[in-house]
Amino acid sequence: MGPGGIAGNQPHCDGSATAVALRRARQLGDADGQFERGRPTQGILHDILLSLATQVGVPAQFVVLPRARVQSAMEHGEIDVRCYAAQSWLPNQSGDYIWSVPLWFQRDLLVSRKEHGAQVSPGRLPRQAIGTVLGYNYPTLQPLFDADQLLREDARNQEQVLEKLLAGRYRYAVSNQWTLDWINQRLQPEQQLQGVAVLQEQHIGCYVRNDPKVPVQRILRTLLRMKMSGEIDEVIRLYTGTSDKSP
């Protein structure tokens, strides 16, 4: 395989992304990544992509990248595969890529503590701060932010957003389903956070740089096999206590 790598990219985490050489790049944090000395050591995407690299037969070398550099790294051949991505997130994607079958189903939720756990309509909330991750876009809430009806209160990563929610800094925050489930596993039942509105639901997967030096079809077949065998869902269950919540 060429000098590129496998990449993952998700709608939450800290401001960095990680590249693996096969090589993969993605922002990792919370349920989907833990770091030592600036390198991911475990997490949903770390484990899945390490298994992918092993099955494809290439080494996985993790490299930390700023989140904004991931697409540029793909275009320059530094990364061969990017995972946890949706085509709707990349409307202006340039380059020659082939997408995998959908591998994950992800929900973005408005969440709250139990005392404020009734279902809500975001558009009917009074003006207040909402916990968000710095640099993330929230299409459902953006018109409310633009109208100054709701206010972003950014934190560096998804875990910090939910920690501030637990501490009472605000009543509501945005979280993806994985991180919500992961955080709730660490809490007593009476402390667990509740989803009060579904903001977005979508299938997500990986895309591969279509280059003769990249074993494109072997990567795509391996991802399909990992999905069909239940391996991917089992990794999710290991970290969140639940399997992929596909509709």
Image (tube, rainbow, N blue to C red):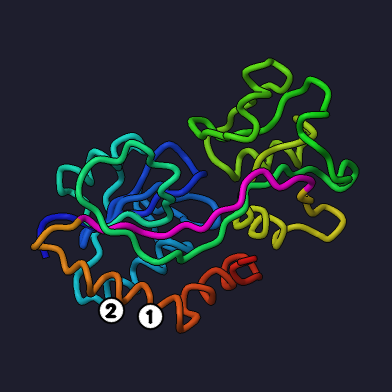
The image quarter containing residue 202 is bottom right
Q: In percent of the image, x 73 and y 38: which residue is there?
A: 165
Left or right: 231, with 185 as reference point: left
Residue 181 x/y as whole percent: 67, 59
Left or right: 1, with 13 as reference point: left
Q: In percent of the image, x 45 and y 80: which residue is there?
A: 228
Look at the image and give the residue range highlighted in magenta.
196-209
Q: How many marks?
A: 2
Label 2: how many Cα within 10 Å (few below 14, some 14–19, many 20+): some
Left or right: 172, with 140 as reference point: right
Q: Quadrant of the N terminus?
A: bottom left
> In front: mark 2 or mark 1?
1
Q: In percent of the image, x 35 and y 66: which residue is there?
A: 49
Query: Secondary structure beneath disc 2?
Result: helix
Q: Is residue 201 magenta?
A: yes
Q: Amino acid at mark 2?
A: Gln
Q: Give the residue number, with chain letter if any, for mark 1.
A: 225
Image: 107 above or below 221: above
Left or right: 92, with 4 as reference point: right
Q: Give the residue number, with chain letter if any, for mark 2.
A: 55
Q: Quadrant of the C terminus?
A: bottom right
Observer-nearest of 167 and 141: 141
Observer-nearest of 53 and 80: 80
Q: Main secondary structure of the magenta part?
A: strand
Residue 90 x/y as whole percent: 38, 41
Q: Is residue 62 magenta?
A: no
Dot 2 and dot 1 residues touching (CB under 8 Å): yes
